[in-house]
Image: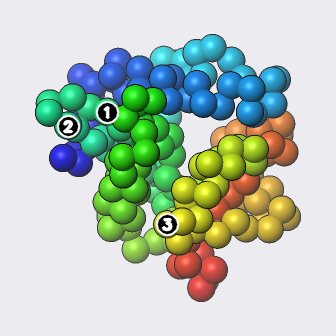
């Protein structure tokens, strides 16, 4: 079942993100990695900045989360994570599909450039990489990330972005 996460699930969302983010250790630049990958303060800041988390629940247990954020004239997909033990079961696909139905705006997704599995996942679901020049402009316009993260990231966009 896909549903909106509520405020009392903060610890579970935090746990899912940091469990699944372990896949990035050794893949993203060492100077961008930290433990935990996302602190409770960072998660709270993301929620306060308008990231609405939706979750995939199975047998009463929240096992995957994905955030959606309306920023200016686009929709961002943020923090897409599925518990390590439950990956490759279609949960991310279902969450992404559901969130895409919630907007008519162009959808953008940022991820680490060396996270080839994540890029392949989004490409498989209709997203395309934007150019390196466009990536930098988009990350500065729609995200609040460091210059170092901009250098080490990519942005993928849906067809609506390319049709603008």
What is the secondary structure assignment of the residue under circle 2?
A: strand
Contact, mark 2 vs mark 1 (Cβ under 8 Å): yes
Q: Position of residue 7 (x, y in %)?
A: 27, 27
Query: Which residue is under mark 3?
Result: 125
Residue at the image position 49 percent from the left and 66 percent from the top: 125
Q: Residue at the spot x=24%, y=22% of the render? A: 8
- Pointer 3: residues within 10 angstroms few (<14), some, or many (20+)? few
Expressed as whole percent of the image width and height from the top left, the position of residue 146 reads 77, 36
Contact flag, marks 2 and 3 (Cβ < 8 Å) = no
* Residue 79 appears left or right of 59: right
Decide if residue 53 is in sight here: no
Q: From the viewer's perspective, is residue 41 above or below residue 13? A: above
Chain-order first, disc 2 or disc 3:
2
Residue plotted at (82% across, 23% down): 31
The numbered mark at residue 150 is none
Quarter holding the C terminus is bottom right
Residue occupying the far top of the picture: 35
The x and y percentages for residue 67 are: 42, 45
In the rendered image of this protein, does residue 10 appear above or below residue 120? above
Other residues around mark 2 within 10 Å, as few (<14) / some (14–19) / many (≥20): few
Spatial CA distance of label 2 from label 3 is 23 Å
- Please name the residue that numbered disc 2 is placed on: 58
Q: Which residue is mark 1?
A: 63
């Amino acid at each position: 079942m896909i549903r909106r996460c509520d405020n009392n699930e903060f610890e579970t969302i935090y746990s899912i993100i940091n469990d699944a983010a372990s896949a990035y250790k050794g893949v993203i630049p060492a100077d961008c990695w930290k433990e935990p990958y996302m602190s409770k303060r960072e998660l709270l800041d993301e929620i306060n900045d308008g990231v609405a988390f939706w979750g995939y629940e199975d047998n009463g247990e929240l096992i995957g989360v994905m955030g959606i954020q309306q920023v200016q004239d686009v929709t961002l997909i943020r923090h897409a994570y599925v518990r390590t033990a439950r990956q490759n079961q279609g949960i991310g696909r279902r969450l992404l599909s559901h969130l895409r139905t919630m907007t008519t705006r162009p959808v953008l997704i940022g991820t680490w450039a060396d996270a080839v599995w994540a890029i392949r996942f989004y490409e498989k679901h209709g997203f395309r990489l934007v150019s390196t020049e466009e990536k930098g402009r988009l990350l500065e316009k729609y995200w609040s990330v460091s210059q170092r993260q901009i250098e080490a990231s990519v942005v993928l966009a849906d067809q609506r972005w390319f049709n603008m």
